[in-house]
Image (cartoon, rainbow, N blue to C red):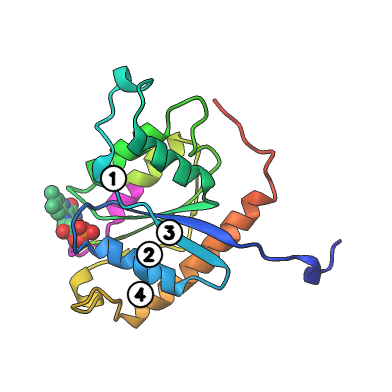
Amino acid sequence: VEPAESFTPVAKRILCLPGSLRRHSWNRALLRAASSAAPAGFELTTYDDLAAVPMFDQDREDLPTPSLDQLRSAVAEADGLLISTPEYNHSFPGVLKNAVDWLSRGPHSTLIAKPVAIMGATTGTWGTRLAQAALRQVLTATEARVLPSPTVFVAHAEKSFDADGRLCDPQVAAALSRFMIAFGDWISHWSRLPGLVVQG
Ligand SMILES: Cc1cc2nc3c(=O)[nH]c(=O)nc-3n(C[C@H](O)[C@H](O)[C@H](O)COP(=O)(O)O)c2cc1C
């Protein structure tokens, strides 16, 4: 048995993906707050160009698509993917589904075995529960490894952020800290079991 002191934490590169195109998106604000809440050693960057990703078309899969190459490389280079999704009509937005469909394709999908964490913010009452459940189901099909718990469901988002989009809700801040620590552990867990990739 190795002594606990021999474990060296490694830097964790996290790619943040907001599921909203809206300029003053609460989900983008939540990702900024996650960046502040992350433990030392995390490097968070954001892919914020989902609008540039064309609508998925199986006939265009083999054509050059620079915006998609950029997204694919960003996901491939990240140790983990952190998605913050709004809820649209009890599910997650089409722009996000479009990106997931593209990412699930290709000779080697960058989502296979990728540690993913999902959170979400809405102005509604239920905190994106249905959107997150739907996204979790879709990501299961891609063989991504989705953090089971804890969860971050931000309801009435307009009350949790100030006018500058800064998180001002201590309960959400505490939940975010726990969530980011758990995501770090989740990434470390899978990085110690790299042989368990099963495609089918
Ligand atoms: C088309 C549409 C459908 C929506 N449906 C829901 C819904 O089913 N449940 C919910 O909680 N909020 C719903 N909302 C509210 C959004 O979750 C809310 O506007 C949220 O702030 C959008 O995320 P953003 O601030 O990151 O852009 C809906 C908004 C739109 C535009």
Give yes or no for contact between labels 2 and 4 (Cβ–Cβ under 8 Å).
yes
Q: Counting residues from the N terminus, which is met first, the one under dot 2 or under dot 4?
A: 2
Judging by the rendered image, the residue that carries numbered circle 1 is 50
User: Does ligand 1 reach within 8 Å of label 2's beta carbon?
Assistant: no
Residue identifier under label 3: 45
**Residue 184 position in % (x across, y down):** 56, 62
- How far is mark 2 from mark 1, CA to CA? 22 Å
Give the magenta part as a residue range: 123-133
CB under 8 Å between discs 3 and 2: no
C-alpha distance separating marks 4 and 1: 26 Å
Q: Which label number is shown at residue 172?
A: 4
Instruction: Inspect this view and state whether residue 156 appears.
Output: no
Q: Earlier in the sequence, mark 4 or mark 1?
A: 1
Is residue 177 in the magenta section?
Answer: no
**Some atom of ligand 1 lies within 8 Å of the CB belonging to the residue at label 4:** no
Element type at mark 1: helix
- The mark lying in front, picked from 4 and 1, is 1
Of the numbered discs 3 and 2, the one sitting upstream in the chain is 3
Instruction: Residue at 29%, 36% (x, y): give it.
Output: 98
| Between discs 2 and 1, the one toward the N terminus | 1
Q: List x then y, in percent, for residue 124.
A: 18, 63
Residue, disc 2: 152
As drawn, is 122 to the left or to the right of 44?
Answer: left
Identify residue type, mark 3.
Thr
